Amino acid sequence: MGAALSLLSVAPAAFALTTVQLKSGASIEADVIAERADRVIVDLGFTVVSVPRDEIESLTSKEAVSVDAVPENADLYRVAANLPVLSVKENVDRVGEAVVLVRTPVGIGSGFFIHPSGYVVTNEHVIAGEYNITVTQFRRGSTELEKVQYNKVRIVALDSRLDLALLKIEDAGPMLFPTVPLGDGGSLNDGQTVFAIGSPLGLDRTVSQGIVSSRTRPFDGQLYIQTTTQINPGNSGGPLFNLRGEVVGVNNMKAMQVGIEGLNFAIPTPVLKNFLRNRDAFAFDPRNPNAGYRYLEPPQPVKAAPAADAKKPSSN
């Protein structure tokens, strides 16, 4: 990526609808995107609504979400229409529980849930060469933040060139995880406010805010989002959000030269969406280290050898 840059150590999905039965007798059918001690946050498609727990009679999932319930070629992510613009503080409350800590024996990174059955997006370099992976979720309890660690994590797909990886939590049982929607990269503008949530240097749920310096910064034949949003080791793989709470990028690089700050980069969501839609092409196979992201060089044409009896031209 060049001497100034260093790697740090994106059609709606078919989610299960939940019926929110209210004590008043009314009911709401929607995607539950977060559950907290005092309220439940649901996505109605055109807006997000926070329903107080005191007003809820019951929550009923119409269909349990499992890995078997996801069709092979179905999109794993969701998009949302007309989400309201909120402050960074309000957005952190809205999307924070979908951001996770990804840990391996040699380092840490960040990630985020894209599907309620436990699919997590992170950077390939966060988990490269590792099989012992844990994911820590941060849930907001009634009085304090609760950490829940999952130790059975499977690598579904990865690609070192794109620096993207898809993980799946396998030991969560029937639990549904909160998710974040993927935004439209084409709607991103230079100067737009964005923010990141991650665990830089292991500091859980750190929030940083900045602006888009350039939405199309080219490096090595790929385009990145350049932003002033501060990221550090441990932010890798975490989401870059707009003020609608949509993921617009996956944080993966920053300038590491002494005295240089504010040069941070993220993988745009169109690249992430393409990776997720074509995840079979990047499928991880532990029996074959070349599978999905590393290929042998193609054979080169053989040049004809010079004739053995060729004579040098005379100097006379």
Image (cartoon, rainbow, N blue to C red):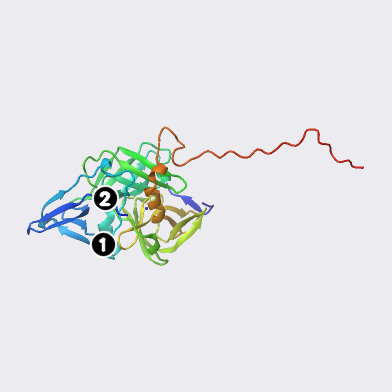
Give the mark toward the camera: 1 or 2.
Answer: 2
Report the residue at 56% width, 40% height from top: 298
Any part of residue 15 in sight? yes
Would you call the spot at circle 1 few (<14 residues within 10 Å), some (14-19), or many (20 or more)? Answer: few
Observer-nearest of 273 and 11: 11
Residue 9 percent across, percent down from the top left? 42, 46
The dot on residue 14 is 2
Residue type marked 1: Glu
Residue 51 percent across, percent down from the top left? 16, 58
Q: Which residue is mark 1?
A: 90
Residue type marked 2: Ala
Report the residue at 19% width, 50% height from top: 141
Q: How many marks?
A: 2
For residue 44, side relative to residue 223 (left or right): left
Most extreme residue toward the left is 24
Quadrant assignment, res 248: bottom left
Residue 74 percent across, percent down from the top left? 32, 47
276 vs 228: above or below: above
Report the residue at 45% width, 35% height from top: 289
